[in-house]
Image (cartoon, rainbow, N blue to C red):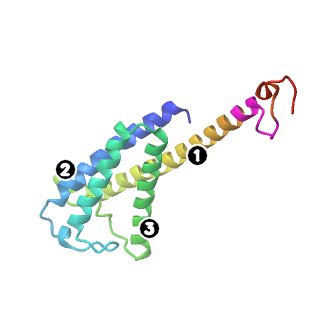
Amino acid sequence: MPLKLIRIFVYSAGVMLLLTAVAKIVSSGGNAGALNVNDRVFGLPNSYLLLLAGLVEGAAAIFCFIGKSRRMQVAILAWLASVFLLYRLNLWAQGYRGLCPCLGNMTSAIHLPSRAADWWLRVVLGYILIGSYSALLWLRYSQKNFTETALIDRGVADGGISDHDSGCGQEL
């Protein structure tokens, strides 16, 4: 996975997170009855949880656009996707088989069926989860290869000191 692909992935994930963050923040201020019901996992009213999740997603999205460290951007995406996956797994373990209340009442406002929104959110979750962990592995592997190659070039990977390092033209 070349760095250009990782950059494209980070920006596209940032756009997706920004869109879902806005939807969650807008939905949190709605008047749907489900917003006053406590969340099954955290015990907070859904309106507060949507607002909190939207703010965290928005911060992650902004970091995808302005962050300086590609590795940190990908790590934050992996962390956030892992949290979302654990949330969904927790709901499933509790026996909840309904749709994820992730977007609040925004789906009705944009005339998108709840099942379609839930399906798209699963696709986004899979994209960010698989993409971020793949990018982290690639960055780790390519960094490890780069470091080992640099050490071999300098003659210190196997514990020896090269002619260049000793300065006297002989191995020590």
Residue at position x 28%, y 46% in the image: 19
Q: Is residue 79 left or right of residue 149?
A: left
Disc tally is 3
Answer yes or no: do the residues labelled 3 and 1 have beta carbons within 8 Å?
no
Q: Nearer the viewer, residue 8 or 65?
A: 65
Judge the density around disc 1: few (<14), some (14-19), many (≥20) Cα neighbours within 10 Å: few
Disc 3 element: helix
Tell me, for residue 7, which label it has, or none.
none
For disc 3, the neighbor class at 10 Å (few under 14, some 14 to 19, many from 20) is few
Residue carrying label 2: 110
Disc 3/disc 1 C-alpha distance (Å): 24 Å
Per the image, label 1 sits on a secondary structure element best described as: helix
Q: Using residue 71 as the reference point, say whether residue 60 is left or right of it.
A: left
Query: Contact (CB < 8 A) between labels 2 and 1?
Result: no
Callout 2, which amino acid?
A: Ile
Q: Quadrant of residue 53?
A: bottom left
Label 2, label 1: how far apart the Cα atoms are:
37 Å
**Could you tell which of marks 3 and 1 lies nearer the N-terminus?**
3
Q: Amino acid at mark 1?
A: Leu
- Residue indicated by mark 3: 89
Which element is circle 2 on? loop
Residue range corresponding to the magenta coloring: 150-160
- Looking at the rendered image, the quarter that the N terminus falls into is top right
**Spatial CA span between label 2 and label 3:** 27 Å
